[in-house]
Image: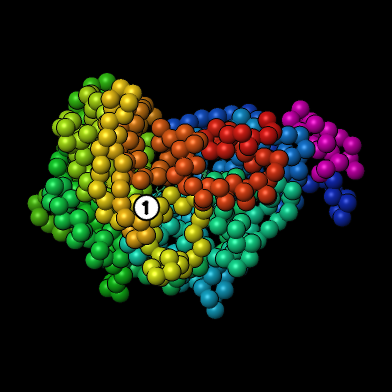
């Protein structure tokens, strides 16, 4: 053993690192790939932190060394993939682990179209590997920049009434726990751990490998059309997501329109993608610059949004049908433009019209119809507000059985009491006379999930004014419809008790599994202890 091995890190790890890193089998010291003074930013630069150490292990022994050191020196470990979660979920002043060095394909099995990958691999890398095998992923969200582990950890979803979360395709997960043990879980093995790991929030340990169910590669014919917003809401029960495998809607409040996008599998020859107005550098810059100016003069936002809508979707407005035939991953993903705050909530699909009518009313200052006790004064929102769906109904409604085990923390699963058409009853609270509404619904029936995503751009990384007031009003509305926020996004008004209440038994079981695998709280970073777990934090 070299008595000075890794001594440059004693300041952070104590001299314990020297004996702990010694590997008697090879008579060498396991590398410790750590960077002090690292600045960690989310992709959108919404938050920045300065972890004491930024760690990028390149092997399982290296990862185990980090975990042992953290446990013994009482540091917390937070994980990050591609840092695409815009909230503080990956921010820490303690140690931050990134698995970019874990990005290989381990094996692929043609007999059942499954692939096992290291968990740091980005979705776009995985798709490339799958493509070489003639396979692809069943469903995708808007982008493929995320790491596999990160996408699973927060419940990433796409938009389809025939598919659920991306993690619905996960067959097996391997995690390195706080004691350094490597454990594999699946629907048949360590099932409770598997259900906890399907949305883990990085709180169970380090996900090192994921086995996915892939599907044969397919192409999609997609079509885009502009519809009148009011008509879209009126025709809710006949919306395109009922008729096509994939469908989503972007609402442009200041144009009174929505762009509906839908896609189905096809074997037609591929075509080129129609030109996008703001794909070009200077136009994109122009849009961002205009929004930047509008951060000082917010009433300019509707003018800017109407202008960009006309430029981007002019052909559709003129009645032209725009579409293409593309590889599935190219068709399903989209250009998300620049830095943004996003606040996405899941509510039962059938509450869509009521919720959207009230939000429309609030944005147009019709306060009586909106019935949201927060002033919309001086609030101008960016477009689009995304309207997406997901299949969260049981495969067998008679037994409420799902094809795959459900994550304990699946934000898209709605409590059964809120699952069917509802009536709203209004009452007045004792304090301040604010109006409080509750949704009353017959229990037991099932509903798909509707996701409403209130995007606010941050032109040149500057927050728009009053964004927290907008989000607070939006969240009040979503809560009335039994909503749950996306784990990774920028909700502003949900405290620990409220998170726990939204998940009830699911949260209780998730916490039980978590405590079982990490009793000392090694993986309880600042976001987890502040927002979700509270008193469970045991180490500094
Ligand atoms: C432009 C944009 C578009 C998006 N589109 C969608 C969309 O269409 N649908 C949707 O649902 N979401 C969407 N998201 C959100 C995104 O999918 C999630 O934030 C996702 O978690 C990001 O993955 P990541 O690799 O960047 O993970 P990070 O943001 O770095 O981390 C997210 C979580 O993963 C955990 N984690 C990371 N690595 C590991 C590991 N090895 N082991 C255990 N835990 C780990 C972290 O601890 C953290 O809790 C979008 C985000 C952006 C910025």
Side (left or right) of 34 relative to 162: right
Query: Which quadrant of the rendered structure holds the C terminus?
Result: top right
Q: Residues within 10 Å of mark 1 (few under 14, many from 20)?
A: some
Residue at 51%, 51% in the rendered image: 506
Side (left or right) of 520 relative to 27: left
| Residue 14 belongs to magenta span | yes
Q: Nearer the viewer, residue 444 or 468?
A: 444
In this rendering, does residue 5 appear at all?
no
Residue 173 pos. (x, y %):
60, 59
Q: Nearer the viewer, residue 302 or 107?
A: 302
Vertical placement of residue 344 versus 113, above or below: above
Magenta-highlighted residues: 1-21
Side (left or right) of 499 relative to 10: left
Is disc 1 placed on a helix, strand or loop? helix
Identify residue for label 1.
417
Residue 406 pos. (x, y %):
49, 59
Residue 128 pos. (x, y %):
48, 62
| Residue 116 belongs to magenta span | no
Residue 536 pos. (x, y %):
63, 37
Colour mapping: rainbow
Vertical placement of residue 295 versus 527, above or below: above
């Amino acid at each position: 053993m070299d008595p000075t091995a890794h001594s440059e890190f004693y300041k952070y790890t104590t001299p314990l690192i020297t004996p702990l890193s010694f590997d008697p089998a090879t008579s060498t010291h396991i590398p410790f790939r750590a960077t002090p003074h690292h600045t960690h930013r989310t992709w959108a630069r919404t938050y920045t932190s300065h972890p004491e150490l930024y760690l990028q292990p390149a092997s399982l022994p290296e990862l185990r060394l980090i975990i042992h050191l953290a446990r013994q020196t009482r540091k917390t470990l937070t994980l990050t993939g591609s840092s695409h979660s815009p909230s503080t979920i990956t921010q820490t002043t303690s140690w931050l682990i990134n698995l970019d060095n874990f990005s290989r394909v381990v094996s692929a099995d043609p007999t059942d179209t499954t692939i096992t990958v290291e968990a740091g691999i980005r979705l776009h890398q995985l798709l490339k590997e799958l493509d070489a095998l003639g396979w692809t992923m069943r469903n995708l969200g808007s982008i493929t920049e995320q790491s596999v582990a990160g996408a699973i950890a927060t419940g990433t979803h796409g938009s389809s009434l025939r598919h659920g979360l991306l993690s619905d395709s996960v067959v097996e997960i391997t995690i390195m726990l706080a004691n350094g043990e490597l454990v594999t879980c699946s629907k048949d093995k360590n099932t409770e751990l598997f259900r906890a790991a399907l949305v883990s929030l990085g709180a169970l340990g380090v996900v090192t490998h994921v086995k996915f169910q892939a599907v044969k590669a397919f192409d999609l014919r997609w079509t885009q059309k502009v519809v009148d917003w009011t008509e879209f809401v009126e025709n809710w029960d006949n919306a395109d997501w009922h008729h096509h495998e994939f469908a989503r809607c972007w609402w442009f409040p200041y144009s009174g329109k929505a762009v509906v996008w839908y896609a189905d599998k096809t074997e037609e020859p591929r075509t080129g993608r129609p030109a996008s107005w703001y794909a070009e550098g200077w136009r994109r810059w122009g849009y961002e610059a205009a929004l930047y100016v509008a951060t000082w003069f917010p009433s300019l936002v509707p003018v800017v949004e109407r202008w960009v809508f006309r430029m981007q979707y002019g052909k559709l407005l003129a009645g032209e049908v725009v579409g293409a035939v593309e590889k599935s991953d190219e068709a399903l993903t989209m250009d998300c433009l620049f830095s943004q705050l996003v606040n996405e909530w899941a509510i039962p699909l059938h509450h869509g019209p009521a919720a959207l009518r009230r939000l429309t009313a609030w944005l147009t200052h019709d306060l009586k119809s909106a019935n949201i006790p927060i002033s919309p004064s001086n609030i101008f929102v960016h477009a689009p507000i995304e309207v997406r769906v997901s299949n969260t109904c049981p495969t067998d409604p008679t037994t409420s059985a799902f094809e795959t085990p459900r994550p304990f923390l699946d934000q898209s699963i709605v409590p059964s009491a809120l699952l069917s058409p509802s009536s709203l009853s209004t009452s007045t609270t004792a304090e301040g006379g604010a109006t409080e509404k509750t949704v009353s619904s017959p229990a037991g029936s099932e509903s798909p999930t509707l996701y409403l995503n209130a995007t606010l751009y941050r032109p040149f990384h500057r927050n728009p004014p009053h964004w927290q007031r907008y989000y607070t009003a939006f969240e009040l509305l979503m809560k009335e419809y039994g909503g749950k926020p996306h784990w990774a996004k920028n909700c502003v008004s949900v405290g620990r008790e409220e998170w726990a209440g939204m998940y009830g038994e699911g949260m209780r079981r998730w916490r039980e599994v978590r405590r079982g695998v990490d009793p000392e709280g090694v993986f309880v970073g600042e976001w987890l202890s502040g927002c979700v777990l509270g008193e469970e934090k045991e180490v500094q």
